[in-house]
Amino acid sequence: MDDKQHVRSNHESLLEAWLKASADFWGTAVRVMPGQSGAFGGKEAADKASKGRVQESLDSTVRTWKAFATVMTEPSAVEGMIKGIGAVPEVLAKILQPAWQGFFHLQEDFLERASRIGKSTAAYNFENLDQEAFKAWLEVYEKEFKKFLQVPQLGLLRVYQERLTEATDKFNVFQATMAEFVSLLYLPMERSYKVMQEKLGALASEGKLPENSKEYYRMWIKVLEGHYMTLFKSPEYVQEMAKTIDAMGEFNEARQRILEDILQFLPVPTQKDMDDLYKELYIMKKRIKDLEKKQTSAEPLDEG
Amino acid sequence: MVKPKIPVDLLLASLAEDAEKAQFRAQKASDVLLEPLDTQIAATPYEVVYQEDRVKLKHYRPVTETRFNAPLLVVYALINRETMLDLQPGRSVVQTFQRAGIDLYMVDWGYPTRKDKFLTIDDHVNGYIDGCVDFIRQRHNEAKINLMGICMGGTFCVIYSALHPEKIKNLVTTVTPTNFDTDQGLLHIWMKNLHVDRMVDTLGNMPGDMMNFGFLLLNPARLMIDKYVGFVENMDNKSFVENFVRMEKWIFDSPDVPGETFRQFAKDMYQKNLLIKNELVIGGKRVDLKNLTMPLLNIYGKFDHLVPPGACDRLTKVVGSTDAEDLCLETGHIGIYVSGKCQKEFAPKIVRWLKKRDAEEEVPSAREQAAMPAA
């Protein structure tokens, strides 16, 4: 106890000495400023400078600090400050703990969402895993991740922020649907190879394999053509194609909105401006043509 | 000796032979490809006699003394270019018509830009086509002219003839879709399910490149693989290479289609099939196919995968004309114009058909008399 009190009193006297020294320092510093003494510019210059706004605020700051430092040299104030400093680690820990907990919770949530990809694909046949992977990703994206991009934006630039997040969302959807469409287009290739393998196997066992290498190509191309015809007539393909074109259209629209936002700050007309102009020109031309036609048909009557 | 089930030796021999041939072919091909090639298309001289906006009217003078009474106006589709009718000497419908003494006019739709996106079917039919028809009528002092349409151009010609029958003497439609309620062609299946409004609102005009890709997708095995395998196998043949390149030039020369025209064509034709049902409205007027009272020759291809027979063969049954004839050729959509065999069948048949009806004089009706151009 005596040691603690001894350490404490050492701290208090150290702090007191520091505060007193800093008050004296700043007081002296202010006195030797060019504005304060007549040493550099004479009394008149000193009077002018002393009236400056910067000098006034500096004087006020130093006076406040000196008063504060004087108060702080009192033993009770010094003791209070030391107690406060001692409490800082505890306060920091209290602030940081919820932040850490929040971060770990988010990370846990994210991992759980990502793990649902695995659960979704497990519901599909293994045979169709490659095909269905895109559908599964899109489903997970729509359910789990899309909502983050749909969080309402705040502030003066909220409209632009919303357009950016919307374009990001549409891009993700477009990428997923396009990937699925392209994988669908590749399916007939894959299946044609399988069919060729079976065919060649059957021909080999019957001893009817063609001797000309070109025959193999002709066989394969016919099989491939047949598979593509089957695919293209299927409702699944038609739906997928329509979905991909729709996604492309939506992404284009969202991207166009962002471009228009950027262009409005530049001295160039946007596509919308030009389209509006073209529309007006088109309507005007039509009206002029109609009037010309009416005039042409009316002329014989006038002459008669 | 028992014949082996897998003739490995014969296969290897065949491969070796093919490799040797391929090597020889590659050497010759580099000579062919590096020397000057005649790949010009649409080489027949013409004169631009009329222009409205991007649309030009080309005139090909006849090269013989014999002339038809009525000139012929050919209207191509908005997709691809009318240069296909004059692809190369020896396979030129234009030259066949010229040699037959036909005063030939052809619409060149040009290359639509963004400012054309608001043009509708009405603008094309009652605007540009009507302007060309009136110009020709006035130039030749004829009340009526012959009209021939190709593919979508044929659809426009059918609409025009139904709205202005007093101006058309004879109508020829080739590979022209008029009935869209068929599943014979992939295009008909796909177009029914497209959300056209979003496409047009987003893209403005329908990009030619996008349509090209769509057409290639109709048969990717043949159009994206087999075609080029065939080219590689024959690239030592200069004549083959020249013809191939001409075809490539034409097939990938695809203008954009004005957005509103595409929207209307896709919705009113492919999705609602209004034309054949006499429910289509253009420029505020209903298109009634019964008004097609002029002689009609309707030609289509049996193996046409773009405009299948089911899309063409109903027209002659619903028109008002008593002189309507179908001609189904054993060919595809483009083969009808470019195949050597069809060149001998297709264009000469049109010439004979028009000649027979060119000599026939008719007493013009009151409406027709009113439509006669001022002398």
Image: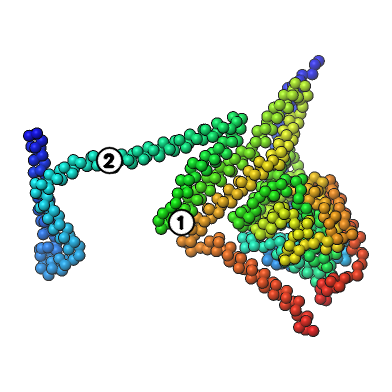
Can you see residue A256?
A: yes
Q: Residue at x 85, y 64 (%)?
A: B169
Q: Which residue is mark 1?
A: A159
Give the x, y percent position of residue B203.
60, 55
Of A175 and B79, the residue lying toward us = A175
Count all numbered tags in the image, as a single digit.
Answer: 2
Which residue reaches farthest top?
B1
> What numbered label is drawn on residue A94?
2
Write down the chain letter for disc 1: A
Q: Residue at x 76, y 57 (%)?
A: B275
Of B241 and B294, the residue lying toward us = B294
Q: Secondary structure at mark 2?
A: helix
| Image position of B42 with respect to B24: above or below | below
Give the x, y percent position of residue B138.
80, 71
Q: In whole angstroms, how far apart are the C-alphas of marks 1 and 2?
A: 37 Å
Which kind of residue does numbered mark 1 sit on? Answer: Val
| Image position of A96 with respect to B61: above or below | above
Q: Quadrant of residue A53?
A: bottom left
Both labels 1 and 2 in a single chain: yes
Q: Is residue B216 left or right of residue B341?
A: left
Give the x, y percent position of residue B29.
71, 40
Question: Neighbour class for label 1 at 10 Å: few (<14), some, many (≥20)?
Answer: few
Q: Residue at x 77, y 69 (%)?
A: B135
Q: Quadrant of residue B115?
A: bottom right
Write down the chain letter for disc 2: A
| Image position of B137 with respect to B112: above or below | below
Q: Residue at x 50, y 55 (%)?
A: A258
